[in-house]
Amino acid sequence: MPEENEELLDQITSSEYKYGFVTDIESESAPKGLNENTIRFISAKKNEPDWMLEYRLKAYRHWLTMETPKWANVAFPPIDYQDIIYYSAPKQKITPNSLDEIDPELRLTFEKLGISLQEQKRLTGVAVDAVMDSVSVATTFKAELAELGIIFCSMSEAVHEHPELIRKHLGSVVPYTDNYFTALNSAVFSDGSFCYIPEGVRCPMELSTYFRINAANTGQFERTLIVAEAGSYVSYLEGCTAPMRDEHQLHAAVVEISAFEKSEVKYSTVQNWYPGNKEGIGGIYNFVTKRGICQGDHAKISWTQVETGSAITWKYPSVILKGDYSVGEFYSVAVTNNMQQADTGTKMIHIGKHTRSRIVSKGISAGKSNNSYRGLVQVGRNAVKARNFSQCDSLLLGDQCGAHTFPYIEVKNSSAIVEHEATTSKIGEDQIFYCNQRGIDTEAAVALIINGFAKEVMNQLPMEFAVEAQKLLAISLEGSVG
Amino acid sequence: MHMLSIKNLQAGLEDKPILKGINLEIKAGEVHAIMGPNGSGKSTLASVLAGRQNFEVTAGSVDFLGKDLLDMAPEERAREGIFLAFQYPVEIPGVSTTNFIKAAVNETRKHRGLEALDAVGFLKMMKEKMKLVQIDQSLLSRSLNEGFSGGEKKRNEIFQMAMLEPKLAILDETDSGLDIDALRIVANGVNQYRNKDNSFLLVTHYQRLLDYIVPDFVHVLYNGRIVKSGTKELALELEEKGYDFIKSEWALAGE
Ligand SMILES: Nc1ncnc2c1ncn2[C@@H]1O[C@H](COP(=O)(O)OP(=O)(O)OP(=O)(O)O)[C@@H](O)[C@H]1O
Ligand SMILES: [Mg+2]
């Protein structure tokens, strides 16, 4: 690697995390540590009905019997679960009735993040639920959505307002017994978004949730539940950022999607949690379980993720293809730089006949980072003529990073067709030089090449966010060329 | 006016000298052809002029329109008006040729203090230059050079040259791999763009190209040095005799 490029790499991989500010806002927290009292505290804070508390306690007791999974291709010191604050809420003087009543500091935070909670959002037609630390602070466009029978609100609110729906669907796709982090999440989750699209309704706008960890030593455990009744459609986007802090912070979220006959759910994530500094100090542990189930025939669930942040990312948005002719998709761009580690991929579980799935994974590694794709395609005995196509591409910048692919395929029906393609490439010095020779500097060249590499996935993002995501890719990687 | 002035240029890889003292003067409006056996250093010279980092310059100087060329980053050289049509153009998957050229054109315009072209202005310019090299729209909407045939790649290089309007265009074997018609088209493109203000350095193995683009000077590069210079008759002589007579002359001269 020519010296100059190395310098440039150094210079730019140290570019600052832009969302690393801390909001100076009073917050109310649970005492550090986890025991049954913590859970009772959270539940009481939220005024929860007994059934909710019972659910949490069952999850907690189950969690106590479990151990941290070790199979992922990531390394981190043991987490001290007694050193985490499980509930932190920005202290608001009053419960806001309208957006105008939200604490100005808080509002400023979201504005800095480019999320305007104000009515001007009307112009872009995106409904936003904003979650700061453990609680939802604002949901926009509620009234407009309600007219169509669409419910879009915070999880805490849903527990009170729509208990029948929550009791029916919560944990139906991701039971608390699923894994270590889902058990933990089920015990201590503090908020998140709930979204319900009634039969035959096409949600007219993007629904979006922004998560923000602000307080120190706090874990964020949010819970998202999306139910799409027969023939409905919704596109949902999730974004996240956190301040720069020296200690690692745990984020263990659960997202569940239930899609009924002929419904379609598109779930997009732009994940930009604080990745830690160049030496790997600080950063978010992003241990997330996301799963959707195509309950009915011809249902479709599509995951799109752009993962640029977090010290460690550990997530596999999955689809259970239960209905005949149902479709699952997974489009992913995962970027790792410096000391970041990502082990991400998907599971496509084909149960119904003629089910189809498509996996497009683009891993980009730079610095000393490690980027793994891990995917499972499972075709059950009855999944006649199931089809899967997987494409896993890795792009390396420099020669100190790693890219790994772990595709698992289990086929129990002989009429199924499963295809897997994988490539690994490096951004070539000759490509950079070619761009340079046309007047394009190295940073711009890398951005151009990266965006070209990730295009197939970026094209899946809702228009409003595609540009933002493109910039994010460029920022996370600028100049890391070798 | 002097466009390019190369003095005693020596360059190579860490353990391998390739250019061993090149001297060359190119004035505005001139076309120079460089010929020479395989491996003699022609592409290396082109790369060094364009600023490729993996060659180390160990001695000499290059003046480009009054500026120290060797002191500039490759993208600066490009923006100042140096264009290299690559012998082997690289592929960049996922990046559309049109978008790539647009980025390039606007970087150069920015450098020259011009506003970036908007979509309409850019399209108009494209249409014009497409005619010049008879390149197809469908090719330009594909990923840069990806899956292009050899000839299509070369044509794309000349199209980019036409779009970027350089002062000095270095064409490294742009004629290799072109069919007869394409050769004529490419040569035509160059000739139309040829005027008193800009210059060309053509690297070629074939006299045929020089029938279409008549050079002012022909140089023979051998073993890292320009060992013979002349007019277009020199190319004819080489075509007839091959490089042997040059090699033996050089051997007699004591290397
Ligand atoms: N990256 C490299 N690594 C090793 N050797 C190199 C490299 N680049 C050039 N060379 C060597 O330098 C010498 C000059 O190469 P160059 O490509 O400049 O020749 P050329 O005159 O353009 O030849 P041709 O007519 O075949 O294109 C050759 O011996 C070549 O092998
Ligand atoms: Mg050559």
Image (cartoon, rainbow, N blue to C red):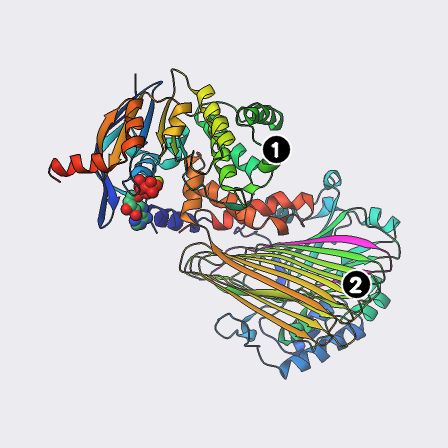
- Where is residue A277 shown, x and y percent of the image? 45, 57
Chain of the residue that carries numbered disc 1 in the rendered image: B
Q: Which residue is mark 1?
A: B137
Asked if residue A224 is positioned above or below residue B187 in the image, the reply reads below
Q: Secondary structure at mark 2?
A: loop
- Looking at the rendered image, the disc whose residue lies closer to the viewer, 2 or 1, is 1
Q: Residue furthest bottom?
A: A65
The residue nearer to you, when weighing B76 against A213, is: B76
In the image, the residue with mark 1 has its CB under 8 Å from the nearest atom of ligand 2 = no
Quick check: can you spot residue A467?
Answer: yes
Q: Residue furthest left?
A: B254
Residue at position x 72%, y 80% from top? A58
Q: Secondary structure at mark 1?
A: helix
Residue at position x 26%, y 32% from top? B220
Asked if residue A93 is positioned above or below residue B208 in the image, the reply reads below
- Where is residue A163 shown, x and y percent of the image? 84, 67
Q: Could you tell me if the residues under marks 2 and 1 are in contact, i.e. CB atoms within 8 Å? A: no
Asked if residue B148 is positioned above or below residue B121 in the image, the reply reads below
Q: Main secondary structure of the magenta part?
A: strand
> Would you say A102 lies left or right of B173 here?
right
The residue nearer to you, when weighing A277 against B31, is: B31
> Would you say A390 lies left or right of A412 here?
left
The part of the chain drawn in magenta is: A224-246
Q: Amino acid at mark 2?
A: Ser
Task: Tell how many labels.
Answer: 2
Quick check: can you spot residue B21?
Answer: no
- Where is residue A457 shown, x and y percent of the image? 63, 52
Q: Amino acid at mark 1?
A: Gln
Q: Which residue is mark 2?
A: A326
User: Ligand 1 lies in which image quarter?
Assistant: top left
